[in-house]
Amino acid sequence: MVRKYVTETVLADATGIARAARILRDGGLVAVPTETVYGLAARADDEAAVARIFEAKGRPAFNPLIVHVLDIAAAEAIAEIDERARMLADRFWPGPLTMVLSRRPDAQLAPQIAAGLPTVAVRSPAHPAMRAILEGLGKALAAPSANASETVSPTSAAHVLATLDGRIDAVVDGGPTERGLESTIIALREDGRWSLLREGPITRQDLDSVLGEETPSNGAIEAPGQLARHYAPGKPVRLNARHAEEGEFLIGFGSVTGDVTLSESGEINEAARNLYACLHLAREAPQLRIAVAAIPDEGVGKAINDRLRRAAAPGS
């Protein structure tokens, strides 16, 4: 049974950030805004705190966590950083790129983070609140999305509280997130190959320009966001809809108008930014089913469609 806590909400100002850092230093859980989605942060070196992440989210133990660091120097303390990783960090950090790298034998990390794998997923976030907390704390933070496992990811403090109120110590309210989708995740193999594990704001084309041609993954769980069913709003989801059928809440895009829209103008980055907010509205609507307009499957649209396919997977 998940223990109950009084979840406090603090602003993303100096006072709130100092409060969040104190809670984290003492082994607590704090939902923190990043440029992608809100993350549920705990000290990455605190085994009991990391265990609370899995407990609060109802997250399966085989699903590894992303470790958030301030910069490449902090990443070097927990992961083997090669020339490719440095090139990617120089170009995309701080920002929405997570690299799965070989874990250093002396890394000060709670064992649950790696989920039994010899690797660690590491990212340097760009959001000023998360960066201020990392700098003030002086420690890496484990931080998956701040929502109950398999549910719609949070892009606001209200979304966090919808599933985690009473399960965590605090949420830092930094307003809506900028990108609206979780980070792109890639694995850098020791033999020089690389694989895209999760689509995100950094596109395959962006990565190709730095790393060359990808070697696809074998499908094994190596990082978050790879489960077949994920981001689920708790209602059946129909994709590529042109109109709403009876009993459906329609999420529109471009020329397809709906109860809400991802982007009236058909702008793909705006659609990414609004995706989870629209799914949260659909979840709360009286209609029992959800329909979503077709999204172009190119650029960031690939990441949007990845999330929608998982949201629409059987059992959702």
Image: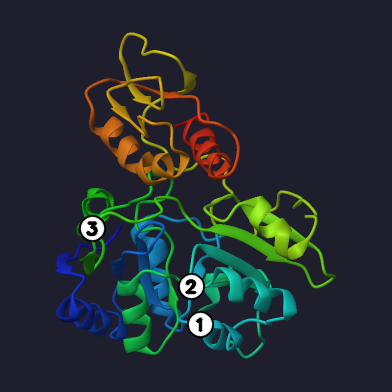
Dot 1 surroundings within 10 Å: few (below 14), some, or many (20 or more)?
Answer: some
**Helix, strand, or loop for circle 3?**
loop
**Helix, strand, or loop for circle 1?**
loop
Say how many tags the image has. Answer: 3
Disc 1 target residue? 71
Disc 2 target residue? 94
Is residue 102 shown to the viewer in this render?
no
The quarter of the rendered structure image containing the N terminus is: bottom left
- Residue 259 x/y as whole percent: 27, 23
User: Marks 3 and 1, Cα distance to the nearest angstrom?
Assistant: 24 Å
Looking at the rendered structure, the kind of residue marked 2 is: Pro
Numbered label attached to residue 307: none
**Marks 3 and 2, the one that precedes in the sequence:** 2
- Residue 212 x/y as whole percent: 79, 60
Q: Are marks 1 and 2 in contact (CB under 8 Å)?
A: yes
The quarter of the rendered structure image containing the C terminus is: top left
Q: Residue at x 55, y 31 (%)?
A: 296
> Is residue 72 placed above or below 298 in the rendered structure?
below
> Is residue 108 placed above or below 292 in the rendered structure?
below
> Is residue 22 placed above or below 114 in the rendered structure?
below
Dot 3 surroundings within 10 Å: few (below 14), some, or many (20 or more)?
Answer: some
Disc 3 target residue? 175
Q: Residue at x 63, y 81 (%)?
A: 79
- Residue 4 x/y as whole percent: 20, 62
**Helix, strand, or loop for circle 2?**
loop
Looking at the rendered structure, the kind of residue marked 3 is: Gly
Residue occupying the far front of the picture: 265
User: Marks 3 and 2, Cα distance to the nearest angstrom?
Assistant: 19 Å
